[in-house]
Image: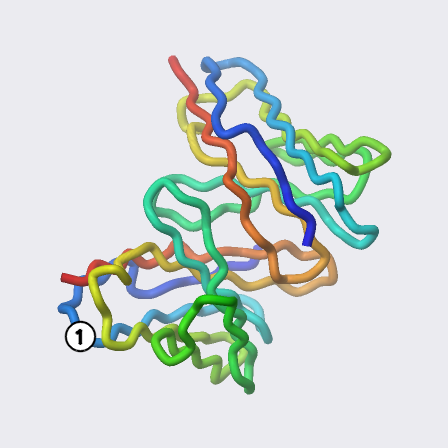
């Protein structure tokens, strides 16, 4: 199971773009990269998943370089409600291990 | 999308009693579900893998006799915390993968257990 490393915390202001990078140096060939968002006292919520290059949905973009040893979650124009913990997970099976996550604080 | 429901959302029990937490996949079938525990300000820790129709697989350090898991149907897994103690107070979360080869895991909203 690939281990992930993320910054412990990040601060931003409303309206800014936030990029959270995750390192996963020993990612395996079959591994997908998945990002989750968690608010206090709630279960994690799926944000985006990708395998390579770039993936975009209505809430975020995920950038994955060719070597796949890292990935970057991009949140466009964050708002106060985006204050949460963001987890990067890597794996090819259902058994996903959570790392420490990144605590994003958005200020007005 | 795939929805996972947990019940109850919170429960308070006395030390020594048992508590059952339910995890349901509402709009899909899940042969495998996962149970996590999360302490305040910490990440989720995988406790066990619940397999429909067979025994659960527990992670190292998790007592299988204390945390009983039953996955009797394709849409329901239960976690029973037996003889609960205050140190079992935590946030318990279940998850299941939706249908489709690359479907992500979907999580329930968690159960806050407080043992007094």
Residue at screen point 70% across, 40% down: A24
Q: Taking A73 as reference, is A39 left or right?
A: left
Establish if B44 lies above or below B101.
Answer: above
Residue at screen point 47% across, 64% down: B47
- The image position of residue B70, as x and y in percent, is 44, 81
The answer, for residue B26, to whether it is visible in the render is no
Q: Residue reaching furthest front?
A: B61
Q: Taking A77 as reference, is B63 left or right?
A: left
- The image position of residue A80, as x and y in percent, is 40, 23
Front residue (pair A11, A25): A25
What kind of colouring is applied to the model shown?
rainbow
Quarter of the rendering containing residue B36: bottom left
Establish if B1 lies above or below A57.
Answer: below
Query: In this figure, what is the number of numbered marks?
Result: 1
Q: Residue reaching furthest right?
A: A66
- The image position of residue B41, as x and y in percent, is 36, 40
Q: Quadrant of the C terminus of chain B?
A: bottom left
Instruction: From the image, tell me which residue sits under label 1.
Output: B16
Front residue (pair A32, B115): B115
- The image position of residue A100, as x and y in percent, is 50, 40
Q: Quadrant of the N terminus of chain B?
A: bottom right
Secondary structure of the residue carrying tag 1 is loop
Q: Label 1 neighbourhood size at 10 Å, few (<14), some (14-19), many (20+)?
A: some
Q: Taking B116 as reference, is A91 left or right?
A: right
Residue at screen point 56% across, 46% down: A46
Establish if B19 lies above or below A108.
Answer: below
The answer, for residue B75, to whether it is visible in the render is yes
> Label 1 lies in what chain?
B
């Amino acid at each position: 199971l690939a281990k992930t490393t993320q910054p412990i915390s990040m601060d931003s202001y409303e309206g800014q773009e936030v990029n959270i990078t995750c390192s996963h140096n020993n990612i395996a060939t079959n591994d997908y990269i998945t990002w989750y968002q968690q608010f206090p006292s709630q279960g994690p919520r799926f944000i985006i998943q990708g395998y390579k290059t770039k993936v975009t949905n209505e809430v975020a973009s995920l950038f994955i370089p060719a070597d796949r040893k890292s990935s970057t979650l991009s949140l466009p124009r964050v708002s106060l409600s985006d204050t949460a913990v963001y987890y990067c997970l890597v794996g090819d099976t259902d058994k996903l291990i959570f790392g420490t996550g990144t605590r994003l604080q958005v200020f007005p | 999308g795939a929805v996972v429901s947990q019940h109850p959302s919170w429960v308070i029990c006395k030390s020594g009693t048992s508590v059952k937490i339910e995890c349901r996949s509402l709009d899909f079938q899940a042969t495998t579900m996962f149970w996590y525990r999360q302490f305040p300000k910490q990440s989720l820790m995988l406790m066990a893998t619940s397999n429909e129709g067979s025994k659960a697989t527990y992670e190292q350090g998790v007592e299988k006799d204390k945390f009983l898991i039953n996955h009797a149907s394709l849409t329901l897994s239960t976690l029973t915390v037996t003889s609960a103690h205050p140190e079992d107070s935590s946030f318990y979360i279940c998850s299941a993968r939706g249908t489709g080869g690359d479907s992500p895991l979907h999580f329930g909203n968690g159960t806050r257990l407080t043992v007094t």
